[in-house]
Amino acid sequence: MRQRVITAGGGGNLSRVAWHVGVLALLAIVLYPIVWVAAATFKPSSEIIGSLQLLPSEATTANYDRVFEGVVGIGVGRFFLNSAVLAVLSVVGTVASSALAAYAFARLRFRGRTTMFVIMISTLLLPFHVLIIPQYIVFQKLDLIDTYVPLLAGKFLASEAFFVFLIVQFIRNLPRELDESAKIDGANHWSVFWHIILPLCRPALITTAIFTFIWSWNDFFGPLIYLSTPDKYPLPLALQLFIDESTGSDFGALMAMSMLALVPVILFFLFFQRFLVEGVSTSGLKG
Amino acid sequence: MSRATITPDRSAEVYTTERTGPRKRARLPGDGLAGYLFLSPWIIGIVLLTLGPMLTSLYLSFTDYDLFNSPEWVGLENYERMFSDARWLRSVEVTALYVALAVPIKLAAALAVALLLNGKRRGQGFYRAAFYGPSLIGGSVGVAIVWKMMFSDDSVVDQLLLTVGIDTGGWAGNPDFSLMMLVLLAAWQLGAPMVIFLAGLKQVPRELYEAAEVDGAGRWRRFRSITLPMISSVVFFNLLLETINAFQVFTSAYVVGGPNGQPAGTTLFYTIYLFDRGFGDYRMGYASAMAWMLLLGVGLVTVFLFRTARGWVYYSGDSGDKR
């Protein structure tokens, strides 16, 4: 069946139905874990393990109730808020700094541009582990451990080369006549950037914003090394704390809290999937 | 960039500005300062957060440093010690095995689904998005917790396998299966490479298949002789990207196995051990040396991939050059 699709076009009703059935079956397997956890959050802990039954014999919201009691005396809302603050600031910083850098790389001519562009591209291949120890030491010397500064500094300094590259590619495909004619009319670089390039780059900026939001929302490593006060924890770290706290026996509440952490990303995906999938296919973003 | 195409004269201009930059610059003197101003956040970032730390970490890798006392020069000792450090050797083994399993399995699954979805079919956009979904959440703590739960003793996967008579006692706690569980988690995120494969498949000229069909080539033959060579640059791109990503997996391994790579050190990934050394016992010098060895390893694999690519990656004149 898979091979028939290569030649595509042809095939009668029967093969079309067979194709849909096949794809849906495959999709059911792939999406099963999400369905499973969604159902598990409404089961009593004892029922999550030891049964193949997907639906709870009797639905309960007890798991969610326990999650809303909080972790180590801190309400779940706090962790949500922390995650949201980090994600929003990350988006603002990344979009602004990446767009500025991309405009320079794509449109301006200055000494060292090509070299700097090559450096930027090569950071795509650089494992970030080479940087974390000295970065940690610097932030420690500056007394910035247990603040959000180390988590956000890079975002405001265009350090995610993927996004700079994505926007550069986008700007390069915009007709140059637009900015040339604006310049003849006396516009400076800033107004060309602000009034012409930025509005036209919207799709690339939206892709950047969505990915930044999701990556920041999911980020675990950064908060793990930089934050130590539970009050400041974003959701992923709170989840880890929850595992340590409950010594892993309260499966139901654990599943419910995992689900709560995933829901915003899933919603984001449902609303913006067009930008996400197109962003990936044009730039090769990892996702 | 999907809607605009580079016209020949403009792409020529892009090249000339790259190659004969100095002469062009003389004609437009105003850009210099503006260029640096627009780039200033990036320049500050690259100096303070990338190049500076790289040099520092290279220096630290030759020292003994615990964050509180000043670094003490020890020459190559950190590097030498790694090769007699059982846990380091273990972490190299675990990571290499993971990369060797996860990357091909994930890419094969991604290509298979891409081939299945390729072509004009109703609902293609929906399916593409649905398969892509797991890529966005797969690396999160929440999914790692769910995964571990699904694969633990007596849970859904174990129960399913028991119905066909296979008793693993749950993959999460079984040293023979714990790494495989993480490989499956990687394969589950097949959506990202799949989308890139689909973009590549769209570029393959249909006439080639028609011509091959006329010549009596079967499906497998058409796949081997047309599809694969025509998307080889996309295969290479995915291979490179996924390999580099696989070397750096951390979150799911940490949630599943903790800082010691439970069970029995089978999930002691390189990054986990690096984290444990650096931030668990503050051996910053040793951890820096480990980071440089990782960079060296990833670099060697990248060079190796580029070298073999000459033999099997085919660049046609105008397809597959979108990135």
Image (cartoon, coloured by chain):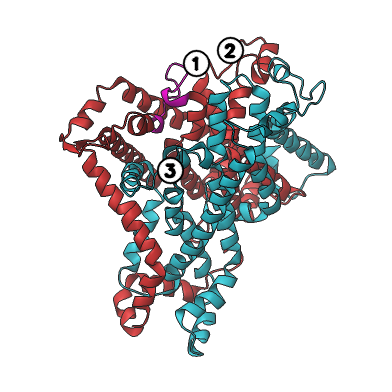
In the foreground, B289 or B106: B289
Q: Main secondary structure of the magenta part?
A: loop
**How many other residues sit within 10 Å of disc 2, few (<14), some (14-19) or many (≥20)?**
many
Q: Quadrant of residue A201?
A: bottom right
Q: Position of residue A242 (x, y in %)?
A: 57, 29
Q: Position of residue B34 (x, y in %)?
A: 39, 76
Q: Which of the chains bears the disc numbered 1?
A: B
What kind of residue is marked 3?
Asp
Residue in the image at 42% along x and 22% along y: B260
Q: Which residues are magenta?
A: B258-272
Q: Secondary structure at mark 2?
A: loop
Instruction: Using the image, determine if residue A201 lies above or below residue B141.
Output: below
What kind of residue is marked 1?
Asp
Q: Secondary structure at mark 3?
A: loop
Chain identifier matching the cyan colour in the rendered picture: A
Q: Which residue is mark 3?
A: A146
Q: Are marks 1 and 2 in contact (CB under 8 Å)?
A: yes
Q: Which residue is mark 2?
A: B168
Q: Are marks 3 and 2 in contact (CB under 8 Å)?
A: no
Residue in the image at 34% along x and 76% along y: B32
How many marks the image carries: the answer is 3
Q: Residue furthest bottom?
A: A185
Distance CA(mark 1)–CA(mark 2): 9 Å
If the image is split into quadrants, where does the N terminus of chain B sit? bottom right
**How many other residues sit within 10 Å of disc 1, few (<14), some (14-19) or many (≥20)?**
some
A246 inside magenta stretch:
no
In the foreground, A264 or B101: A264
